[in-house]
Image (cartoon, rainbow, N blue to C red):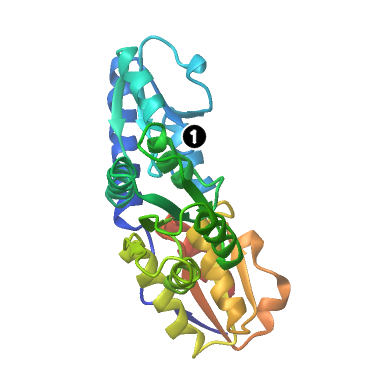
Amino acid sequence: MKVIRARVLGFCMGVRRAVELAEAEARRALASGSSVYTIGPLIHNPKVLENLKKMGVHVIDELTQLDKNCSVIIRAHGIEPHIENELYSKGINIIDATCPNVKASQIKAEELFQAGYCLFIAGEANHAEIVGIMGYMQSSNTSFCKVVGNTIEARREAKKLYSINNDARTALLGQTTLSEEEYTEIGEAVGLFFPNLVIIQTICAATKERQNALRDLLNHVDAVVIAGGKNSANTRRLLAIAQKYGKPGVLAESKADIPQSFFAFNTVGLCAGASTPDTIIDDIEKELLK
């Protein structure tokens, strides 16, 4: 068997920054005898989270789980501002590991909303990044802000808004891990009702690089293994791209997830999500080459 790696692999800038901040805080806390927490998982990769837990970084869901002498790391996907404000009010030491691209989306969404724009947010309603952005919409001059996951939802919500206010100022922002194709199609669906829709370019460059690298790779392989966490949105989208191109694909969190049938292919591509560490990529490649 021949294994061909995608030309772009490994941590993206935002993930690497978050992990390095968490590891540094874990070392500091160990020396001082304090605790370290994240509100929700720092990133979407179980192996990385397991390693951080061994270093003393614990994932919690409620602020009531915090102890007095602790630090809180804001996850790469960001959190809702009211949670961050509550942490500050308690005097807790905060390390903000929000991805700079996500932070820019949060700020832009708040600016547009406060300026009276009706917002369409392209993405997954329950994804941590979207939940965080929606938290910035608590007070404004308008009450319209809808999460749309596909063109059907985009058309439906745009039609509803048009029936109420056909002259509304509208803007579109997207989850940073969307594909350009998805984002463009959602923008076109809203644009059918609001031709002057302002489309903010929020798709992360790292996301585009990995998706384009996969498309190039698919021309040279029989099947593809996508290394990464099953809860990772950008990893799942890589798998969807492979499947759309008609290539057998599998999402593997570890080498144990490689189907036996994949060892029968002559050439297998290896791609990875933006939160997948090099160690997992290397382990999967070694297993395939056996």
Residue 77 versus residue 64 in the image, above or below = below
Residue sitting at 41 percent across and 25 percent down? 83
Residue type at mark 1: give it: Gly
The quarter of the image holding the N terminus is bottom right
Residue 84, how many percent across, how many down? 36, 26
Residue 221 versus residue 203 in the image, above or below = below
In the drawing, does residue 203 fall left or right of residue 131? left
Residue 109, how many percent across, how many down? 34, 47
Residue sitting at 50 percent across and 74 percent down? 270
Residue 157, how many percent across, how many down? 55, 56
Q: Which of the two residues, 257 or 100, is positioned nearer the viewer here?
A: 100
Q: Which of the two residues, 196 or 97, is positioned nearer the viewer here?
A: 196
Residue sitting at 28 percent across and 48 percent down? 108
Residue at the disc numbered 1: 40
Q: Residues within 10 Å of mark 1 (few under 14, many from 20)?
A: many
How many marks the image carries: the answer is 1
Residue 264, how many percent across, how many down? 68, 83
Residue 71 versus residue 118 in the image, above or below = above
Q: Which of the two residues, 177 or 274, is positioned nearer the viewer here?
A: 177
Residue sitting at 49 percent across and 90 percent down? 219
In the drawing, does residue 38 fall left or right of residue 286? left
Residue 168 visible in this rendered orientation of the protein = yes
In the drawing, does residue 251 fall left or right of residue 260? left
Residue extending furthest toward the right: 261
Residue 196's image quarter?
bottom left
